[in-house]
Amino acid sequence: MTENSGRTELGELGEFGIIKHLTKNIVLKNDSSILGVGDDCAVIEYKNKQTVVTTDMLVEGVHFDLMYMPLKHLGYKSVMVNLSDVYAMNAVPKQITVSIAISNRFSVEALEELYEGIYLACNKCTVDLVGGDTTSSTSGLVLSITAIGEVEASELVRRDTAKESDLVVVSGDLGGAYVGLQLLEREKEVFKTNPKIQPDLEGHDYILERQLKPEARMDVPVLLKKLEIKPTSMIDVSDGLSSEMLHLCESSKLGCSLYEEKIPLDPTTINMAREFNLDPTVCALSGGEDYELLFTIDLKDYDKIKGNPNFTVIGHMTAKSAGANLIARNGALYPLTAQGWDSLLKKDE
Amino acid sequence: MTENSGRTELGELGEFGIIKHLTKNIVLKNDSSILGVGDDCAVIEYKNKQTVVTTDMLVEGVHFDLMYMPLKHLGYKSVMVNLSDVYAMNAVPKQITVSIAISNRFSVEALEELYEGIYLACNKCTVDLVGGDTTSSTSGLVLSITAIGEVEASELVRRDTAKESDLVVVSGDLGGAYVGLQLLEREKEVFKTNPKIQPDLEGHDYILERQLKPEARMDVPVLLKKLEIKPTSMIDVSDGLSSEMLHLCESSKLGCSLYEEKIPLDPTTINMAREFNLDPTVCALSGGEDYELLFTIDLKDYDKIKGNPNFTVIGHMTAKSAGANLIARNGALYPLTAQGWDSLLKKDE
């Protein structure tokens, strides 16, 4: 990870030393952050607002592979993944806590790199790191991040409040993070076979960034407010469109109809999916990690969002009895499944 | 962990199934818990109070050993350890989130046992479990818990506000959890040599409970309020008296004098320490995991606390220049060290 010449062992600093070293430059930026790292707890004050809390755990070998995920990107992504959940409540993240279990195969410099990414994400979204825990692990790296945000009670958007005939809308485009991962996996295999071959990643910036450096859609709640739209329900797309849509349907006790032809796909996603013999629609439905926002709006708000380049209307909510379905380009109807269309992933199988 | 006959594989339920299964009986008990498990975030509302947040990560093989720590106890202890940090701010815990990374060597029944302990601790302290994350791990079990609590701004007690000549007070007694651990380690070694020998744990309930089922001192903030005492600073004893005292001194930019003869020790702790050829004082100073509260009070409050069986005055704060010292029974002065008196741990060495 780092050159041997500049390597400082974790043991040289000790637990308290490491925390102090990694958090010494923190300047709290939010009025609500009363007290940060260094006491038994952080202290936060939200005056008459509701607080939202979300937590995510990322495990080496399960959620990330350090062979192609640089530590700085890992830190950045871990934070963004959590903040995405806060934006999905139509709330604004203000604080995070970061807990890390790390083995001594990592150096202090490696941990610094990880924190560089964490701080970069915090700065981008004006979020304060207010606490955490650094501990040793017997094997892999484990990251657990908790994000805390604020929202006016009247602005909060939940999952269980969609209504029948509401339109289903998604921000950005889908499937890119998944094909980016396929590309990284392929180049890793090539590298393992012959370490002298340079990875062929040229010209694939977009899908690689979607996988390695995802951005939480902090702009969406702001955009929606400007458009004077309050979504009737919202969720972020972490596990794929299909899985998230099923969550909205189940929570709101409704069904839905999504139109395959409406699902937004970037041309580079389509091209790379074809290179891997994958159906781009399936990548969007089941790939996950796009961190776009999926929401429903009242029909009367359609004119406000129509033609907006940030959003695509991809379907509508139906009665529960109608089920949750995808209407394919050929008009055929496929029930959405949470398990991710595994059987369909390879087009020619 | 569980009998094969009643074993359900984690994969049979899937990630969402497991979370639903483990959280289906939750009833939110605090008015401030607006929305619990099941959305992108939990929602909390504190009206004009300050929020405190703390997080801890526990790693198998580092913080616990499942050979002698039953999963139910592990769940209970993991929660108590976090709540202890909230009480140490003179605050009241209201919500927790629990993230777990677990390998498939555990069954659903094992996870249920873990959660049984978690819910038991939550019920004891009237805390709502409002969110979390359950994920797979490639090897050991990792638990990350975040606790959130509330406090009036005027009641908050920090680490950095002790004053010179304040008295140093500790609740309960110290060192028990450490000698309990020594006993468990010894019986584990005996068991490894000859699995037919039953562990000799009879008559050691107190020190075993101190190690396996610690209680966060939720009664202390209440007691102090009744006594009309607001501590000038406070911390919980997780790493041993010495380490915590140094935190208070460093944060408050002061020194201290602690008196060895005043350190509260349970007779069973003293006896077991002697059996292991350990100095009981050293067990209190460096053992850790007692989860008592260590705090400072103004001299004028001495009469209010004097003779109270819950508290012991063990010393006083001094100028920083005087250093942080222990005054031994023989009058000799020893500087407190964070590393835990390692060289002194074996009396006869």
Image: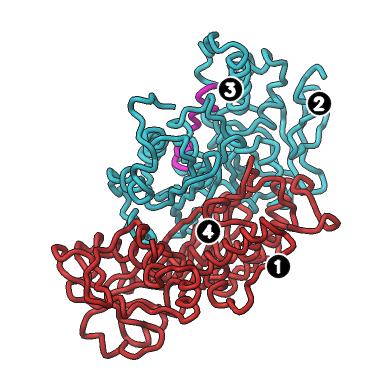
Chain colours: A cyan, B red
Residue type (three-letter) at the residue carrying disc 2: Gly
> What residue is disc 2 on?
A331
Magenta-colored span: A208-223
- Which quadrant would the C terminus of chain A be assigned to in this image? top right
- Marks 4/2 in contact by CB < 8 Å: the verdict is no
Residue B157 in sight in this render: yes
Image point (53%, 69%), residue name: B180
Distance in Å between CA atoms under marks 4 and 2: 41 Å
* Disc 2 versus disc 1: nearer the observer: 1
Element type where label 3 sits in the image: helix
Question: Which tag, 3 or 2, sits closer to the chain's start?
Answer: 3
Left or right, B308 with respect to B64, comes to left
Pointer 4: what residue? B43
Q: Which residue is mark 1?
A: B198
Residue A193 image point, x, y percent: 62, 13
Asked if marks 3 and 2 touch (Cβ < 8 Å), the reply is no
Along the horizontal axis of the image, is A124 left or right of A190?
left
Q: Residue at x 25, y 78 (%)?
A: B167
Callout 3 touching callout 4 (CB < 8 Å): no
Amino acid type shown at disc 1: Gln
